[in-house]
Image (cartoon, grey):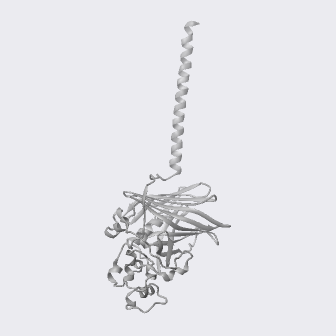
Amino acid sequence: MAGSRPLTAAPRGVRFAVLCAAVVVAHILVLAWVRYVIDASSLLRPMPAPMYSRLLQPDAPAPMPVPQAKPDTRVTRPARPSVTSITSKASPAPPVALASDAGTTPADKPASQPTPEPALQPASAASAAADPVNAPDAATVATAPTTAGSQVNTTGPTNPETWPTDTQLTYNVTGYFRGPLNGTAHVQWQRDGTKYQVRVDVKVQPIFTYTFTSQGDIEPAGLSPRAYEEVRPGGKARGVKFTADSVVRDNGSSEPRPPGVQDTASQFIELSHRFQMGQEPLQVPGVVSVHLARPGGVDLWTYDIVAREVLTIYAGPTDTFHLKPRPLANPRGNIYPEMWFAPSLLYLPVRIKLNMGEDVYLDLVVEKIEQAR
């Protein structure tokens, strides 16, 4: 009996070792599976959060042919740098009337005013009365030119450096859905070489949160999304993967990838850059079209440039262009975004209004624009 104990002890030790090994292997497999599920459920690889060190102040619009071609001092006011100071001085009063076709005051050269590209002209105070956040009275904005704005003046659209440095727009959110709504929102742009990320967060506490994220490449033609994900109330994420020639949805179905296609998040920065580089004329009246891919499919969105308006934001009264979408023939949702782009703030969208049905909307007005470095 004494000699048989080692024979019975050894199998127990072996069984224990095998059991431990099996547990370890099982844990490894479970962790690998969890990682696979996480990777499969999210198409994104988030970039590290940047540190913002400066507040973006208004600058003159990047292209400056109008001030050079026209002796009118009104056109040079954005560089002084107040966009609506044109309404506060007595000497440039005639040019103020020239900013609006209706009710023009006779001026020295009224016929030559439409010649410059409208996107390069300063604010039209006459259009301010059409919007509740417009600034009717004149104010002088203390500003300083920014590095990002000067970069775009000297480099071409094929250079990634023409795109802004890491930038975050913070918005105050108001709206209505069975009662008044209040919240905050952010549009965050990040660039790492030729890679980009755009993240849009809209939070109306404690009711709901929306998150839209786009990642991809910066190419000569513009932003080229590779992955898009949106998280709506309820926490369920839906995404779209972009290949060289296809847009692939969550369910595996796909459709051809249109040239220049964007997504819900990337469109804000892409349109800003197109306007800034002169790839799309920003003028009233005008039309801008862009294909947008979402989990439901790809649609061609057409925005009418309907007005020039002066909005009061953190930087003071600011000249903007108001874009309004045309209804889709076969809408996949009920969100229609109106956008206001500010030429003096890198053509970024300083106001976004999300219309979600009759008397249901969210109105995002920028509180500050921060940049890294």
In this view, which residue lies farthest toward the top? 2
Q: Residue 70: image x %, image y %?
A: 34, 84
Q: Nearer the viewer, residue 288 or 184?
A: 184
**Where on the picture, by quarter, is residue 165?**
bottom left
Task: Answer above or below: position of 285 versus 250.
Answer: below
- Residue 351 seen: yes
Q: Residue at x 44, y 79 (%)?
A: 85
Q: Residue at x 57, y 6 (%)?
A: 2
Q: Residue 197: image x %, image y %?
A: 45, 58
Query: Could you tell whether 122 is left or right of 296 in the image?
Result: left
Q: Nearer the viewer, residue 294 or 135?
A: 135
**Where on the picture, by quarter, is residue 140?**
bottom left
Q: Residue at x 48, y 65 (%)?
A: 368
Q: Nearer the viewer, residue 278 or 321?
A: 321
Query: What quarter of the picture does the C terminus occupy?
Result: bottom left
Task: Answer above or below: position of 14 versus 180.
Answer: above
Q: Residue 144: image x %, image y %?
A: 38, 69
- Residue 259 seen: no
